[in-house]
Image (cartoon, rainbow, N blue to C red):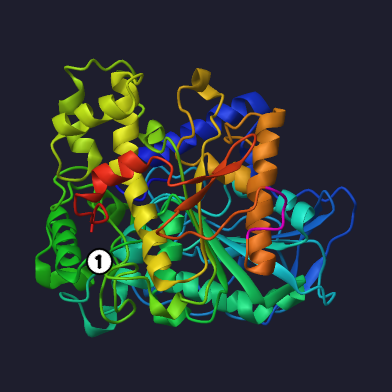
Amino acid sequence: MNPERGARPLALTRRDLVAAGAAAAGSTQAWAAPLADPTGASPVASTRAGRVRGGVDHGVLVFKGIPYGDDTTGRRFLPPRPAPSWAGVREATSFGPASPQTHPPEQTSEDCLYLNVWTPALADGGRRPVMVYIHGGAHSHGSGSDPTYDGVNLCRRGDVVVVTLNHRLSAFGYLYLGLIGAPDLAASGNVGGLDLVLALQWVRDNIAAFGGDPGRVMIFGQSGGGDKVGTLMATPAAAGLFHRAATMSGQAITASGPLHATARARAILAALDLPPDRADALRALPAERLLQACETTDPLLGKGGVFFGPVLDQVVLQRHPFYPDAPPQSAAIPMIVGNTHDETRYFLRDPKNFTLTWDELPSRLGPEMVVDIDPRYVVARYRQIYPAYSPSDVFFAATTAGRSWRGHLIVAEQRARQHTPTWMYELDFRSPAEGGRLGAFHTLDIPLVFDNCDKPGSLTGTGPEARACAAAMSGAFIALARHGDPNGAGPPAWPRYDLTRRPTMLFDATSRVADDPRDEERRLFAAVPYIKPGT
């Protein structure tokens, strides 16, 4: 779920972690299995397109696979259209297909515009806060049906409505053909983002029938999902569709430029032996062939598969999300910005990285910081700051600070300069997995925010420390959704982020606020220009 690079192996890694959790908990087949309804009651909700029948899970009403958009199979690279109406009652007890992607853990299809709703009640005038989660997996992998995204516990804890969704990914959602394709492809580099806009329009128009308040919609997402949240905050078409936001390890600073995005499109055409003037041929290409072409080496990064993400196309996206400042259109939206203490221990967990020597460290560190700074100097400074750190400790700390943490800090800093309500967190709770060596790794905050410590793949453990951290995190997110302020779920008080104190909530078994944590690391990397990796 890393939005920076390495998306393809990370999809495998995430699946491996889920499978490992399932081995202990039973099976991951619940991902796609129809929702059991032991009570015999089958709740039916009305949407503008037609009625849907869901199920019940621990007293929560659950609707899976509700179409919010039409099938995109025949309209590849084009903006989405609302789902057509249907007669009768449509079954909504199984998740819809995910977008086509490499190494998928579930069914995929270009007919993928589906969402899922968890709610305590239907059309009861409850006007509950609505929490819309946007999944990670960079912009090339994932779906809204991961077990750790299950909304039952959030509903039960906070009397809220939870929504997860699928949207177009990879080339299907972010292949920019605006400079080399037909005129109707001008928005092709951002149709995945337009899918998200359409889903939020569906929420606006239908969520009251599910007991929700269309005037209190919070969007939140982790990693690539956090990037998507940040991008929506700068997308004119999304203005007014949400009222609170939270990013978890997601760094939407800059989007891809149109020239770089076009170079990537040309690389895909070349991999298919198509000349640049044949971009329109991609519309009818079998999905599998298009995905295979996306595996070609990125022409700008020189490694991995082709990078995908939002594009500064001046059509859908008219400015970078958080450059040169925070987007004015979202200045009134309260926002949580957060990261984990040990981000890179997840996606750089090659066994060799846990046994580094001081001699090996600089050459291993240089390529992974994703900023242009002398790794020997970085190592020397870390040895001064943290004299007890091992070479591997320095490797993970420096790659987290240089590669992942920087983007979150910049978002919080830009918001502070704008004097907008922003709260910063850092997850310090350490996973017990692999003997604790993964620490507070990338994705660990997902099951804690969803209060899903016992779900396959969570890797938080189910002890009292994990439960306490989950209560604190989920309570804060629920409070933001309800009140526009994460305070109110219990002590300690969480001050707004500012550039003087830089107060940061450190979520742990016992959470606390610290001013400017890791200040020496922040200053070390602040001297180096930052551009979001891949853009």
456 left or right, relative to 273: right
Residue 121 seen in the figure: yes
213 left or right, relative to 383: right
168 left or right, relative to 258: right
Q: Which residue is mark 1?
A: 282
Residue neighbourhood size for the residue with mark 1, other residues' Cα within 10 Å, grouped as few (<14), some (14–19), many (≥20): many
Q: Residue at x 13, y 36 (%)?
A: 374
- Residue 507: quarter of image: top right
Say what secondary structure mark 1 lies in.
Answer: helix
- Residue 76: quarter of image: bottom left
Q: Is residue 487 magenta?
A: yes
Task: Kindly report the secondary structure that dominates the magenta region of the rendered protein.
Answer: loop
Residue 349 position in % (x across, y down): 36, 27
Residue 31 position in % (x across, y down): 61, 45
Observer-nearest residue: 197 or 394?
A: 394
Above or below: residue 445 compared with residue 27 = below
Observer-nearest residue: 380 or 191?
A: 380
Above or below: residue 179 compared with residue 434 = below
In the current view of this chain or complex, which residue is farthest to the front? 500
Q: Is residue 224 magenta?
A: no
Residue 176 position in % (x across, y down): 24, 69
Residue 95 position in % (x across, y down): 62, 55
Magenta part of the chain? 486-491
Observer-nearest residue: 182 or 402?
A: 402
Observer-nearest residue: 405 or 218?
A: 405
- Residue 315: quarter of image: bottom left
246 left or right, relative to 464: left
Q: Residue at x 27, y 26 (%)?
A: 384
Residue 454 seen in the figure: no
